[in-house]
């Protein structure tokens, strides 16, 4: 494991949730047509089902929703995949990223005039030259490294998983235990190289209105790191005290209302 990832493993993070809709479905609700499409991008160690509580609330309030299946192979390549999805959607978009998904949306939305707001949920907001490993190591507090398991892949790549036995406490401490255990089984791994990959070029948060939901008891990305990145981006911030890295699972109502706030304030 290279030095950047060792830094992340010793002090920081990345993560969680994928596909609960399609662009065609998002446009199918006539009542939702006047509202922006909300695109949700998960990070590592979870799958798209984690967004379900958020999706239900957004749809109830008339928002079309698409949850992107983040490949978790590398920042640039993942951003290209998400950008292709964005390009398939008509009208304004509110783009949401959790954890490592924050790095992906920061690149994917750069220069995209349809993206009116970025919502970061316990997420990374890198600038060019910074990786998830760099950012998670800026502040103490992450215990992620002690929970990771490596799975070597052909071609020299390595997938990282969170040990299932350690997952609930590490990743989802405020989620009901039975649900956290299910998430531990269905988690999607990330290529360790993705955590060490530097952001490149312009980042969307430098030009697009940004909102940051900070998880106050996060054991993956230290809350201090989240706050520092949010302040640098001049983001509007809400902190959920006592929330784990899975804040969007444990607090779906708060997460959905924060996304809707971004939509109301940026889409005219």
Image (spheres, rainbow, N blue to C red):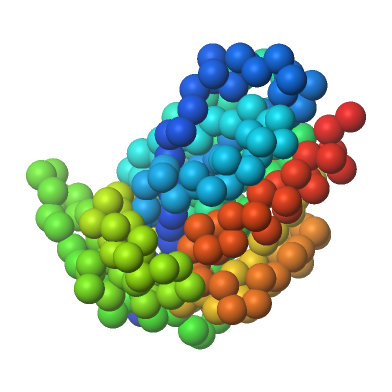
Q: Is residue 32 visible?
A: yes
Q: Quadrant of residue 60?
A: top right
Residue in view at x 80 percent, y 59 percent: 236
Vertical comparison of 174 with 198: above or below: below
Q: Is residue 129 visible?
A: no
Residue in view at x 49 percent, y 27 percent: 21
Label tally: 0
Tell me where residue 40 appears, x and y as whole percent.
55, 40
Please name whichever residue, 29 or 4, is drawn nearer the observer in this view of the structure: 29
Please name whichever residue, 86 or 50, is drawn nearer the observer in this view of the structure: 50
Q: Quadrant of the C terminus?
A: top right
Q: Quadrant of the N terminus?
A: bottom left
Tell me where residue 130 appears, x and y as whole percent.
53, 59
| In the displayed structure image, the side of residue 11 where residue 98 appears, left or right | right
Residue in view at x 53 percent, y 48 percent: 53
Tell me where residue 149 appears, x and y as whole percent.
20, 67
Q: Quadrant of residue 69?
A: top left
| In the displayed structure image, the side of residue 65 where residue 47 appears, left or right | left
Residue in view at x 42 percent, y 43 percent: 48
Please name whichever residue, 49 or 70, is drawn nearer the observer in this view of the structure: 49
Tell me where residue 182 appears, x and y as whole percent.
29, 58
| In the displayed structure image, the side of residue 250 where residue 212 appears, left or right | right
Vertical comparison of 118 with 184: above or below: above
């Amino acid at each position: 494991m290279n030095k950047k990832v060792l830094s992340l493993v010793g002090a920081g993070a990345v993560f969680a949730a994928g596909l609960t809709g399609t662009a065609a479905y998002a446009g199918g609700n006539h009542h939702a047509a006047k509202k922006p499409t909300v695109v949700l991008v998960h990070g590592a160690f979870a799958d798209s089902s984690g967004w379900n509580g958020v999706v239900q609330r957004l749809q109830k309030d008339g928002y079309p929703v698409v949850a992107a299946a983040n490949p978790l192979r590398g920042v640039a390549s993942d951003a290209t995949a998400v950008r292709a999805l964005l390009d398939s959607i008509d009208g304004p978009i509110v783009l949401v990223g959790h954890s490592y998904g924050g790095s992906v949306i920061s690149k994917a939305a750069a220069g995209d005039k349809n993206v009116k707001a970025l919502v970061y949920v316990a997420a990374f907001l890198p600038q060019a030259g910074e990786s998830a490993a760099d950012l998670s190591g800026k502040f103490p507090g992450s215990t992620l490294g002690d929970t990771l398991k490596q799975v070597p892949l052909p071609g020299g790549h390595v997938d990282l998983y969170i040990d299932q036995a350690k997952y609930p406490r590490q990743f989802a401490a405020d989620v009901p235990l039975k649900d956290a255990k299910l998430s531990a089984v269905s988690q999607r791994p990330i290529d360790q190289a993705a955590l060490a990959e530097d952001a490149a070029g312009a980042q969307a948060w430098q030009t697009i209105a940004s909102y940051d939901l900070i998880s106050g008891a996060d054991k993956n990305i230290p809350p201090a790191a989240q706050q520092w990145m949010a302040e640098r981006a001049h983001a509007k911030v809400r902190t959920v005290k006592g929330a784990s890295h899975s804040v969007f699972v444990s607090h779906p109502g708060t997460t959905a209302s924060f996304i809707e706030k971004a939509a109301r304030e940026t889409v005219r």
